[in-house]
Image (cartoon, coloured by chain):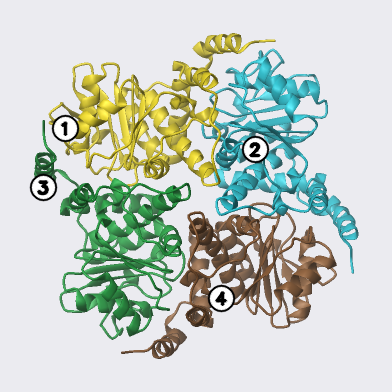
Chain colours: A yellow, B green, C brown, D cyan
Amino acid sequence: MQTREAATASTVGKMKTQLELGEWTEAQKLILTCRMLALESHSESLAGQISMRSTNGTFLTTPMAIGFDEIEARHVIRVDESMQVLEGHGMANPAVRFHFWVYRRRPDVQCIVHTHPPYISALSMTGRPLLVAHMDATPFADDCAFLPEWPGLPIADKEGDIISTALGSKRTILLANHGFLAATSSIEETAYLAVLIERAARNQLIAQATGPVKELDPALAKEAHDFLLLPNVVKASFAMFARRTLRRTGYQLEG
Amino acid sequence: MQTREAATASTVGKMKTQLELGEWTEAQKLILTCRMLALESHSESLAGQISMRSTNGTFLTTPMAIGFDEIEARHVIRVDESMQVLEGHGMANPAVRFHFWVYRRRPDVQCIVHTHPPYISALSMTGRPLLVAHMDATPFADDCAFLPEWPGLPIADKEGDIISTALGSKRTILLANHGFLAATSSIEETAYLAVLIERAARNQLIAQATGPVKELDPALAKEAHDFLLLPNVVKASFAMFARRTLRRTGYQLEG
Amino acid sequence: MQTREAATASTVGKMKTQLELGEWTEAQKLILTCRMLALESHSESLAGQISMRSTNGTFLTTPMAIGFDEIEARHVIRVDESMQVLEGHGMANPAVRFHFWVYRRRPDVQCIVHTHPPYISALSMTGRPLLVAHMDATPFADDCAFLPEWPGLPIADKEGDIISTALGSKRTILLANHGFLAATSSIEETAYLAVLIERAARNQLIAQATGPVKELDPALAKEAHDFLLLPNVVKASFAMFARRTLRRTGYQLEG
Amino acid sequence: MQTREAATASTVGKMKTQLELGEWTEAQKLILTCRMLALESHSESLAGQISMRSTNGTFLTTPMAIGFDEIEARHVIRVDESMQVLEGHGMANPAVRFHFWVYRRRPDVQCIVHTHPPYISALSMTGRPLLVAHMDATPFADDCAFLPEWPGLPIADKEGDIISTALGSKRTILLANHGFLAATSSIEETAYLAVLIERAARNQLIAQATGPVKELDPALAKEAHDFLLLPNVVKASFAMFARRTLRRTGYQLEG
């Protein structure tokens, strides 16, 4: 009888050479993430931002009021912490300011996505947290913070302080009356969690509309959390989502 | 620490020059709005109308039983307050009559949209008003009236009187057992609110199916309302929705 | 002040000459209806049938296990009341048998559609009838019967007797644990009601998931029922749905 | 008056020659099933697998982290019970291990699908079983087992033992906090049940969000179960879904 530990070890070994992980530049990954999230309903209005930290302390992001579904290479902009645009055209979304609060407090974080997709938005209106009641939601097991009060429009420093404090050391946070934040050490992981959290909220709300849901055993959830966040599981998932995005949109990556 | 007031001022300044606002004629904006709303499920049946006031006291609208998703330049018609078609072919929707009641009582209103999209329709059946429980719903904070009784098919003068009275000085109204109306000083703002109100109803209903929702603090909601209705936020959103509409439908604007 | 009676009369007058009603053969209308209903999720599995009575007492229908979304001119078959195929290839759906029970008892009925779209199916599982709580649902006001017990697979004569008895003289019926039937004097009206009933069920269920709904005043509902079933409202709606179907599917009508 | 028995006999007779059942190789059916399930939302993440038993005791499956929506002939792999890839490229999904437990205990089973589509996922979170409250759900009448506890990530032998034991001799099983399994004697039947179970869960959840549902009489449900699982009903349904998949995706079958 093979144990889960042995199966995991065997899987980790095979994943080193047997998965299609894709090869894209940082800017291409940013574009793919924007378009991937647009396909998953993360870009309904001009709310929502993505940022990536570069080694020189500047950040890649996309301009205010350009939809995630229309981002091309020419739209990618580089900004500094004072929101000045160093490269590219347009202005940064004023809400990117609260991203910098997270980057300052979390040196491990290299990429942040914040959006208001439909089910996360609806869940955020209930005053209740995300539950881990499905295997596919285990990446959020003990790893999704909750800010129970909306501090107002998140464009100033106060909201950055509040949100980054509430996030603590976790990968994600549900923001009441607002949306979510994913903040991890790679764009692949941030994009992956952004895709998964909206689906987790959807499944939770559909289930809860019919009655209470049954949460997972925390120890089993933790084990699945760690497996589903294995670097190559994350990268292979990102690559699969990226290929799907390219197929569905017909977009041709530049550069 | 930058305050929200300072962040807003800085954003307003940058938005003057840094946003893509589009350049379209009035008729093109009308067509774009029809097609934008069709993409957002506002045109399921022949119910629903759009009208724009011209400076000479006539109105642009679209013909009865031509779907919002098929409107082209050749469909745009000009009517007077007696519903006579002055330019173009076809007949005005008889329900446009109640638009004129609003235009007479509200000199500030230049464009009205009335439709029955799915979630607004469902909300309208509950006898309960739209709630402001999400940042994205703040454009309706203290700015969405409620008509709690359906007066019958809205084709005669009585319904125009009732609806325009209930609207009062607000931008939008939820009509029980019926739909909504957005009536503002520009087609961009009317279209923007029409898109947002259906999503606000959707999020509210999904959340309320699982229990009560948590409304926003009115002062914070008012502040976000004012920001999200800044003229350039509205115009940039309309332009983003319009570009999306053109991309998704493949429609080529004429003229 | 124009009254609703005067507005209706004026509208009826204009509709005689000002609407685009389309020109299609009976077979083309059958194909358009199949494809229109497929777009509205009425053809998920091989359940569901359409039939039209011809003046010689035979019937047009489509073959078992050909999806509504793939019907072309070559698929249309003619059958008699014993389910023999007189023209075309394939076999009639055995459930068409209960259509004949309706045709025998209702000489006014010329076209029947029976399907199991998602929301009608879900509503049919609740044991509760369709409510008239929205203007767009008024074509079902006092005109939608309810069969509260599922008699079993509807392929034999017993079910035909039960369903046709339950339908009585109404245009539509909700069949518990099953689906609906629309049976009217024209294919346009039957198709129109089939499209509307699924949306009415959708809106009702979304609303009821959050609490009770508020039904319409029966007198006002009756008045709207009669307006929305005016022959030219029905025909113009069918034509709009048909044009939409042709645009969305790219299907080219033959012959 | 024709009885249901006579109608069934007559239908079975006609179905022998009058249905379009398609002609595809085993590998083509595998590809069609993957793509059919992707269209029905069964392939949101890298979770989910399909396997087919070959006469020589090896199995066809698809590689880990290749989405069902992108499967082409070149992706199909052959594995043995130790998860070694005998033909093709990539690695088997580690969760295929639990399929082998089913194949060992159920010599009748030739094809297994396991996925986590949205409504099955949501239902699996409620701790409640699938109900048979609609004619279209009768293929699950007394034929859908329920595993009420999630045993953890299904990649080791223990989970295979638990899941195959819980399945027993039924065709399908709902796995709490997880998903479902369909395991039957043909790929057509497994695919058909996989499509139907997600819709059954959807209809159940939409209905239950508004209150209790009314289950079917077990004897009538059993009769419909047997009819809807008649071999030619299954094959004709698979063929209809396959043609739909080819039309919608534009995919050209190879070889």
Q: Is there a contact, CB below 8 Å, between mark 2 and mark 1?
A: no
Q: Viewer-nearest of labels 3 and 4?
A: 4
x and y percent of residue D61 in the render?
Answer: 66, 25
Residues under labels 3 and 1: Cα distance? 23 Å
The amino acid type of the residue labelled 2 equals Leu
The amino acid type of the residue labelled 3 equals Lys
Q: Which mark is drawn over residue D79?
A: none
Q: In front: D55, or D181?
A: D181
Where is mark 1, residue-wise? A157
Q: Which mark is drawn over residue D32?
A: 2
Which residue shows up at 90% across the image and 59% down it?
Answer: D6
Q: Quadrant of the C terminus of chain B?
A: bottom left
Where is mark 4, residue-wise? C141
Residues under labels 1 and 4: Cα distance? 56 Å
Q: Is there a contact, CB below 8 Å, between mark 3 and mark 1?
A: no
Q: Which mark is drawn over residue B16?
A: 3
The image quarter containing residue A246 is: top left
- SS type, badge 2: helix
Q: Are marks 3 and 4 on the same chain?
A: no
- SS type, badge 1: helix
Q: Is residue B14 left or right of residue B88?
A: left
